[in-house]
């Protein structure tokens, strides 16, 4: 600390303590008043002067730096050690509070979605025993015209098929009442995958009267050449004849270009692509948060506590959650039943029907055409139910199938 001085400068106790206080406060600078005594020929005189006081720092010392660092670290460690019990107690309290809140939320969600067992009346036993019968009555029998590989049922296979001439195409305008299988039959084709592939159809149910389709002269699919493809690799992968591939496409060179399109005679679409185009892939009928509460198949009945076959899959979620059409189709019936409460049944064509049960409210109307994802009702707990959930059943050609096998 540097202080401007006078000859014979004497600090009073008050002024000296003020300087000490300044040093302890560690402020950069300060103005202080100190008494000054002067010697004169006639004696002494006293005068109060205003002095500027500032701190001065010495040269940097690595030793002092580490000593100060160690001192500060020691003070911090001591403070932490003294506070450790309180920190531990606070941490335990916060963890317990978070666990309690999480438990409360989960308990609230559980009780919201599971209202507990219903009281069973003696007359309800017949409904349990006839569960499968009731479900079967809901399903509409519909014979499928196409198998899993796209082959048309009872289609007449030509005795002589010309796979040595180049494939030819003609244009056909879709007529009212046409289906992909009836059009294929009309032109002597045996697999609907041919028309799907050649016309790049994403959903056969969207075919409309007046739409124009390209009709090939023989069965097969379109293949787009990829980088690295060769004729041999294409032939091996699709199990077709190299000679037929060359003849049908009128190829004079074995050199292929990426992006080039070939017609593969006798080849068929893979099942995944075919199912997507035929509308055999369904979406979840609940888009909000839900829990799988009961799977398809044999289980112990949650109310009667007897082993029974569960005809669909249950999706537990709060009352009022929107229920969506899993696939586009026509609403063939809506109603109320003691077992399924409020229900909706949709016919999707190609042998598929779906049942949506235990609704709190039915939104769709009988005879209405609904697109995939259309809201058809709200989740509830009507009928034979332990709590709010959607019971979802899928039928294929009048027989129940596991819903998870068609959901994408």
Image (cartoon, grey):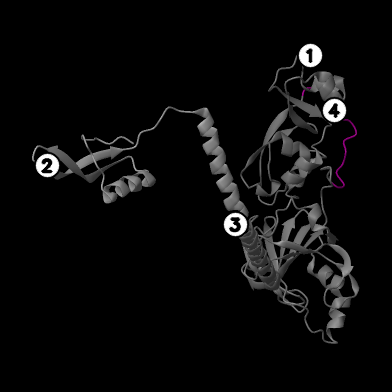
How many other residues sit within 10 Å of disc 4, few (<14), some (14-19) or many (≥20)?
Answer: few
Q: Is residue 264 above or below residue 289?
A: above
How many other residues sit within 10 Å of disc 1, few (<14), some (14-19) or many (≥20)?
Answer: few
Name the N-terminal-most of marks 3 and 1: 3
Q: Mark 3 or 4, which is nearer the eye? A: 3
Name the residue nearer the viewer: 296 or 181: 296
Image position, residue 229 (x, y; %): 77, 21
Mark 4 highlights which residue?
Answer: 237
> What residue is drawn where x is 82% and y is 50%?
145
Q: Secondary structure at mark 3?
A: helix
Name the N-terminal-most of marks 2 and 4: 2
Q: Secondary structure at mark 1?
A: loop
Residue 158 is a magenta residue = yes
Q: Mark 2 or 1, which is nearer the eye? A: 2
Distance between the Cα atoms at labels 2 and 4? 123 Å
Q: Are marks 3 and 1 in contact (CB under 8 Å)?
A: no
Name the residue nearer the viewer: 407 or 241: 407
Mark 3 highlights which residue?
Answer: 83
Q: Mark 3 or 1, which is nearer the eye? A: 3
245 relative position to 177: left or right: right
Name the N-terminal-most of marks 2 and 1: 2
Residue 40 position by quadrant: top left
Q: Are marks 2 and 4 in contact (CB under 8 Å)?
A: no
Q: Mark 4 or 1, which is nearer the eye? A: 4
Mark 1 highlights which residue?
Answer: 254
Mark 2 highlights which residue?
Answer: 43
């Amino acid at each position: 600390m540097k202080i401007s001085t006078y000859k014979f400068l004497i600090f009073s106790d008050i002024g000296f303590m003020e300087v000490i206080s300044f040093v302890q406060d560690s402020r950069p600078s300060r103005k202080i008043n100190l008494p000054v005594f002067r010697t004169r020929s006639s004696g002494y005189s006293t005068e109060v002067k205003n002095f500027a006081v500032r701190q001065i720092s010495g040269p940097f010392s690595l030793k002092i730096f580490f000593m100060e660092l160690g001192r500060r670290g020691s003070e911090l460690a001591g403070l932490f050690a003294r506070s450790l019990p309180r920190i531990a107690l606070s941490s335990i309290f916060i963890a317990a509070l978070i666990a309690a809140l999480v438990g409360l939320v989960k308990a609230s969600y559980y009780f919201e979605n599971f209202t507990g067992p219903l009281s069973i009346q003696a007359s309800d036993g017949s409904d349990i025993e006839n569960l499968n019968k009731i479900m079967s009555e809901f399903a509409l029998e519909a014979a499928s015209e196409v198998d899993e590989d796209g082959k048309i049922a009872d289609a007449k296979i030509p005795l002589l098929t010309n796979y040595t001439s180049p494939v030819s195409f003609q244009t056909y305008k879709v007529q009212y009442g046409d289906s992909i299988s009836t059009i294929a039959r009309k032109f002597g084709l045996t697999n609907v995958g041919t028309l799907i592939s050649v016309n790049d159809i994403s959903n056969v149910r969207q075919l409309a009267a007046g739409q124009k389709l390209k009709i090939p002269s023989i069965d097969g699919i379109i293949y787009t050449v990829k980088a690295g493809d060769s004729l041999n690799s294409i032939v091996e992968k699709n199990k077709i004849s190299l000679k037929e591939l060359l003849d049908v496409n009128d190829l004079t060179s074995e050199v292929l270009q990426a992006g080039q399109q070939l017609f593969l005679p006798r080849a068929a679409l893979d099942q995944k692509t075919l199912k997507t185009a035929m509308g055999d892939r369904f979406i979840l009928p609940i888009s909000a948060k839900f829990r799988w509460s009961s799977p398809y198949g044999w289980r112990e009945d949650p109310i009667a506590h007897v082993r029974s076959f569960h005809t669909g899959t249950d999706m537990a979620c709060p009352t009022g959650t929107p229920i969506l059409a899993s696939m586009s189709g026509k609403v063939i019936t809506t109603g109320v039943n003691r077992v399924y409460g409020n229900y909706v049944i949709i016919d999707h064509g190609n042998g598929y029907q779906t049942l949506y049960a235990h609704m709190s409210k039915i939104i769709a109307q009988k005879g209405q055409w609904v697109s995939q994802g259309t809201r058809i009702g709200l989740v509830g707990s009507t009928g034979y139910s332990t709590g709010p959930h959607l019971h979802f059943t899928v039928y294929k050609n009048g027989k129940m199938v596991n819903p998870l096998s068609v959901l994408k």
